[in-house]
Amino acid sequence: MNSLLRTCSTVLLILALLLTHACAFSAPTALAETTPPQPDNGVVLLFGIGIHIEPLGATTSQIVNGGVQNQFKRLGPDYHNLKLFQRHVQDIRTIAGIVEQHSGKLTVQAQTPFTQVAIQSGETILADFEKSGHEIALHFHEDAHLGRNSEQLPASTWAAVMAEEISLIKQAGAAEVRYWSGGNLYPHLLEAASQAGLEVMSDWKNRETQTTDKSLIGINPWRPAASPDGADVTGFAQHDPDGKIIFLPEGDYSRTDFPSMRRAKNTGGDEGYFEFLKASLYHSIESAQPDKVNVFHFTIHPGEFRGNSAQPYSILDRFLAEVVDPLVQNGSVEWATFSQMADAYEAWEKANPGIDPRGNNTTQANNYPPAAIDPASLGKVERDITYGVADGIALKMDIYYPKEASGAVPAVLYVHGGGWITGNKTAGAGVLEIPELVSRGYLVAAVNYRLAPRYKFPAQIEDVKCAVRFLRANAATYGIDPERIGAWGGSAGGHLVALLGVTDATAGLEGDGGYADQSSRVQAVVDMFGPSDLTTAFQGANPRLLERVFGTTDRYSETVKLASPVTWVSSDDPPFLILHGEKDRLVPLSQSEILHDRLIAASVPATLTVVKNAGHGFAPAGGPIDPSRLAITKMVADFFDQHLK
């Protein structure tokens, strides 16, 4: 089973790489269109971009070795190679020029040997940047400067080597260094940095897992109460108003691997990564609060995203032009260096003494329940919200707000049909239920998902699961109860919601769309005439369709078994309502009967309603359908009322 899935993923990756290569010779395309957030009562998000200059060719400091010249040297690319050094200098100047064209500012984080070579060669890049309003800071790779087993060294040694690095940055042209990144797992990090004269930190990630702890993800700065103790950031995530260091979270990112995902095969290349950044930026704006300091930033490296040599860094230029510039113009975003973000936070501290900057109730304006829906949104529809990114594709959903709400409301996910090949979130038999559900106080999320044959299974279920995780992760934003989420769909959509209902993370169908720390389980499922056992032959799962969707004509293959909901039924599955036309020739009634029998055998609450005189999609066949279409809608809403309210 796993080998088949890996093979399928490899084929898709090769196709994606070929398409990316082909596109490199055509005019750059715009990022996917999404309506940018509008300013809300003066809420502003401070936005910045950092540059990490890596320690290419660094040797451990003589401070560590007591002045003895037996330093450990990092192998690989080396800034003492002037050709490499000059190329990266040009890269950084090009990036700065693009950012300046958009009235932006960088926080350039340097370290040796880049600074040493700059001093020796007379390169003035750091001084030039500081004069232009950019910030110069320290990027501290502990193993490069402190050697192996750096975590065993005392804080005084760390502080001395950090101060040495700062001194070289200043010799290379910078007047002030307040911010640093690096040293993330050292249990005395904050003490050492403070001794070295540093004040501001960000970019925390576990270097061993290349992930950021979810407790550190957000948009509101704070003063950590303690240094991280290896991967344990419990104290670091807590606020101490007397702390000496300000920590800047990077934004409201949906993935804990966001610092490293740009290099992942399934990100979708540069386009996919910047689409993810756009979605994360938009969501951070939506999460911003008027009585807080709100920040968002990301970091790049020299040579990264260079792209076509004829138009270097064009993806960055397009991102700033198409995404950031409109937000600056409408007042939602302001450019800032990282220390300027810290300055804004310090000003907020003075105006709000003793208040936890990450708390939910800092002002009277926020005393309403955190999951309440904004009354102005009731009865409205929000289109094309990005709920995840997969294969470089922005995954979209429409959110239909309930007409009335009191506190947190249940949410239901609508998944369209179309044989896994066609269809969209505004079509399909299930859309008829949306008005009734909205009128009964449900928030409805109608989703698009990747379609075959371009994207083979399990892409479709991965996206649907990602949508559930998105809703759960953003429950407070949309005013929903994360413990009351249901799903319904018809035909292929019925299959997907059934598979959603009977599988958990152990099935290996979660994908990498985002929100990996959230569960994709739902609490109620309505399956309308969906396939449940693809190992049996029927018209709606003919060999040609199997090959186009699942990559095989062998209906007994592990992939097809994996895709069949009946494979996964267990006693902990949520309640099911199954509806099927008795005269359905595309997906026969037996498909629902098989699923219903398996659920009942597993002691799962399940009801099968056979619709008389109904073909596929409840199309009349030989007389009026019974129950009627209106009665079916009421039946669906009543079922969700029973299990989600």
Image (cartoon, rainbow, N blue to C red):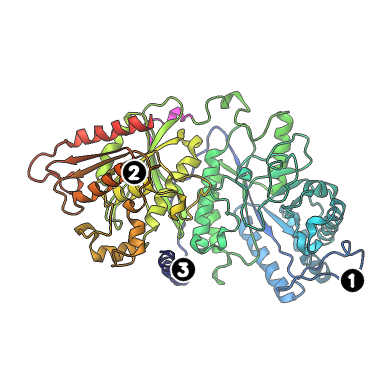
Left or right: 575, with 299 as reference point: left
As drawn, 3 above or below 573: below
Task: Tell me if label 3 and label 1 are in contact, CB under 8 Å.
Answer: no
Left or right: 8, with 630 as reference point: right
Q: Give the range drawn in magenta.
A: 372-381
Q: Nearer the viewer, residue 359 or 92?
A: 359
State the image coordinates of residue 174 (x, y, percent, origin top left): 80, 56
Q: Is residue 452 visible?
A: no
Q: Earlier in the sequence, mark 3 or mark 1?
A: 3
Q: Which residue in the rendered view is the most extreme toward the right? A: 67
Residue 374 in magenta stretch: yes
Amino acid tagged 2: Ala
Amino acid tagged 1: Gln
Q: Earlier in the sequence, mark 2 or mark 3?
A: 3
Q: Which residue in the rendered view is the most extreme toward the left? A: 622
- Neighbor class of circle 2 (other Cα within 10 Å; few <14, some 14-19, many 20+) is some
State the image coordinates of residue 459 (x, y, percent, origin top left): 39, 57
Task: Tell me the number on the disc at residue 150.
Answer: none
Q: Which of 190 and 546 is in front in this view?
A: 546
Task: Tell me the number on the disc at residue 602.
Answer: 2
Q: Which of 229 and 288 is in front in this view?
A: 229
Residue 385 location, quadrant: top left
